[in-house]
Image: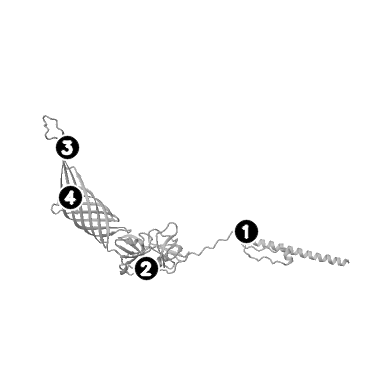
Amino acid sequence: MSCSSIRRTHAFFAAVLTFSFAGVTAAQEEDGATEEASEGSGEAEITAAPADEGAEAEGGDAPAEVGAAVDPTSTGMERPALPTPPPSTTDAAVVAEKVRSALAIVRCQGARWSVGFALGEPTKVVASTEARGCRRELTVESLGGERTTARSVAADGRVSILILDEPIGLTALEPRAATPGLGEAVYAVGVPGGATDPAVTEGAIAFADDELLQSDAPHPNGSEGGPLVDADGRVVAVLREGSDRGVSASTPIGPVAERVANTVVTAEDVRQIAYPGFGLSLGIMWDSGDRLLGASGLFSVDILDRIIFAIELGGYANTDGGAVTQKIRRSLLIGNVSVGYRIRVTFPGGNSATLTPQVGFSFTYDKSEITTTTVGIADPTCNLVMDSCELTEMKVKTESSDWRYRPSAGLRLTLGAIELGYETYLDTSDIGDTGHRLHVGFRF
């Protein structure tokens, strides 16, 4: 080979080596720039490394796609936080304003029994099933203070349906036909004892079908019968008793609304005109200077929670030492038939009491036993001078009885199931034999 050929070959290889060294240097500078940019920005995005030089030289495989998804745990990076769902756009105060005019308090003889709300019509009220257990006067009171009597016409599962005797300014709520979905926001509406404004709490649906609805909307005890509504103020269920476990059961409104719509008052009115009552009392009775202790039982019939017919039977007794040698035991069986009129008094907070003045007629069977004790000779033939006579105690018992019929008058005060009473039995022939009785007991 000639010298010129050798020089050309050396020049060619020098050029190739120079080109290769320049390419490697450029790639290293590019990698360093990429790392500095990544460290300076602090971003989580990872740029794919360039392909190896052999592949680039051969031109076989394409470089990895920039911005490809990478597991943060594999690179030591923190996992990004999950997005927070947007808060509810419905305020509890807005729901309270929508529902307030439909709410009512159901009272039995003035005592609070349930929360209720108008549904379908202003004079039809849905309440808890406890309202149906009221055997006395049933009243419904709006949050504005208007009140009227009501009739219990039907029980539908765990609710009661009441008919008002006159409108009291209630606005009926709209029942929701569609079953709410899982996780949908709902609002429990109740009226705490003594409050004049509703209390609204927010929750979400945990379970719902045609027979049961469960949500985590908290509501205190005493809210039973109140509505569970959606964000538009439509009723989805009737509240049952609250639960401490966070999820409470409610009665879906669908079957209830259908029953309310089909209720015919004149055909389904089942309010009792008369209902029985029972009582038991302990007392003290005195007449003619004697005080007798005893007990009596009462059976009564209440008509429309106003007029009361009662029959009472009792027994009283007393033992008195009497004279030195006498012991008197007196027993008295008494019966009384009376008619009374109930007057209800309501106190702040929903508590109530009733006063029942009554007049009647009494009959008594009065029996007295007088035992006279004497000391004498056991053998009447014994000679007191000549013999030592044995002494013995002798008792002589005499009995007397008498039936007496006297007019009676009295007053009874009832506080819940506890009853206090006073009666007088007038003796027209001998005012000194007028009887008096004071007693305390239970009335059911």
Closer to the eye: label 4 or 3: 3
Give the quadrant of residue 354.
bottom left
Three-letter code, disc 3: Glu
Look at 79% across and 65% down and name the residue there. Answer: 16
Q: Distance between the residues labelled 3 and 2?
A: 83 Å
Nearest to viewer (mark 1 / mark 4): 4
Residue carrying label 1: 74
- Per the image, label 1 sits on a secondary structure element best described as helix
Q: Are marks 4 and 2 in contact (CB under 8 Å)?
A: no
Judge depth for marks 2 and 1 and give the one in front. 2
Can see residue 38? Answer: yes
Residue 169 spot, x, y in % from top left: 34, 68
The disc, 3 or 2, on the residue closer to the chain's N-terminal end is 2
Label pair 2/1, CB-CB below 8 angstroms: no
Residue type beneath disc 4: Asp
- Read off the residue under disc 4: 366
Q: Is residue 103 left or right of residue 384?
A: right
User: Can you identify the residue that label 2 sits on?
Assistant: 259
- Circle nearer the viewer, 1 or 3: 3
Q: How far is disc 1 from disc 4 in space, using C-alphas? A: 104 Å
Of 348 and 317, which appears nearest the observer? Answer: 317
Image quarter hosting the C terminus: bottom left
Element under label 4?
strand
**Label drawn at residue 277:** none
Sequence order check, earlier mark of 2 and 1: 1
